[in-house]
Image: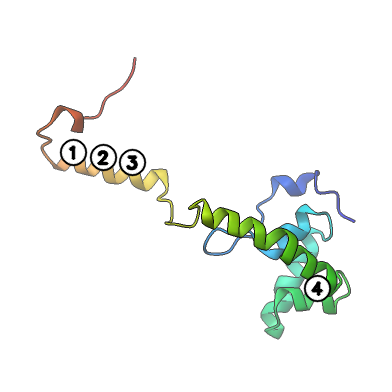
Amino acid sequence: MYNSTSSATQTHLPTSRLGRKRLGAYLLEAGLITPAQIQVAAYDQQVTGKKFSEVIVDRGWIKQQTIDFLIERVIKPEQQGRRSAGVFAQPVEPFEQVYARRKHELLNGSPDREEDLPWTVD
């Protein structure tokens, strides 16, 4: 088994376009597969068109029962908790974009009110 407290916690865990952790991230955190196995499975997935879970089961790395358990007892409850807390309500705009947009507004507009002006604390 893979020790999840090693350098794997410092690497980027796979996420979906919505920012949710993917199955591979959960398996990696649980120490059930390695980063190398995730890479191999992702490649196999592209080549064969199979689901990630099908690839790792076919390769014999994880049993289907383990994946089913993880999905039902960990992944679904975690994602439902985030959804009910509003985590997926709207995408977060990166700070750099907010800063650039706000800077542009302040430089190109003529703020009429004092609260529209940038301020700093010295």
Q: Is residue 37 left or right of residue 119?
A: right
Q: Position of residue 106 (x, y in %)?
A: 19, 38
Furthest-top residue in this view: 122
User: Could you tell me residue 88's position as x and y percent?
Assistant: 49, 57
Local SS, label 3: helix
Which numbered disc covers residue 107?
Answer: 1
**Label 4, label 2: how far apart the Cα atoms are:** 48 Å
Q: Which residue does the numbered mark 4 point to in the structure image? A: 56
Mark 2 residue type: Lys
CB within 8 Å, label 3 to label 4: no
Q: Which residue is mark 3?
A: 99
* Residue wearing tag 2: 103
**Between marks 4 and 1 in the image, the one whose residue lies nearer the viewer:** 4
Check disc 4 and report its element: helix, strand or loop. Answer: helix
Question: Of the residues shown, which amino acid type is indicated by label 1?
Answer: Leu
Q: Position of residue 40 (x, y in %)?
A: 77, 70
Quarter holding the C terminus is top left
Compared with 29, 112 (above or below) is: above
Q: Which mark is residue 35?
A: none
Mark sitting earlier along the chain (4/1): 4
Evaluate if marks 2 and 1 touch, with contact meaning CB atoms under 8 Å apart: yes
Q: Amino acid at mark 3?
A: Tyr
The answer to whether the residues at label 2 and label 3 have Cβ atoms under 8 Å apart is: yes
> Please, what secondary structure does the residue beneath circle 2 have?
helix
| Real-space Cα separation, disc 2 to disc 3, in angstroms | 6 Å
Q: Residues within 10 Å of mark 2 (few under 14, many from 20)?
A: few
For image coordinates 79% across by 66% down, the residue present is 69
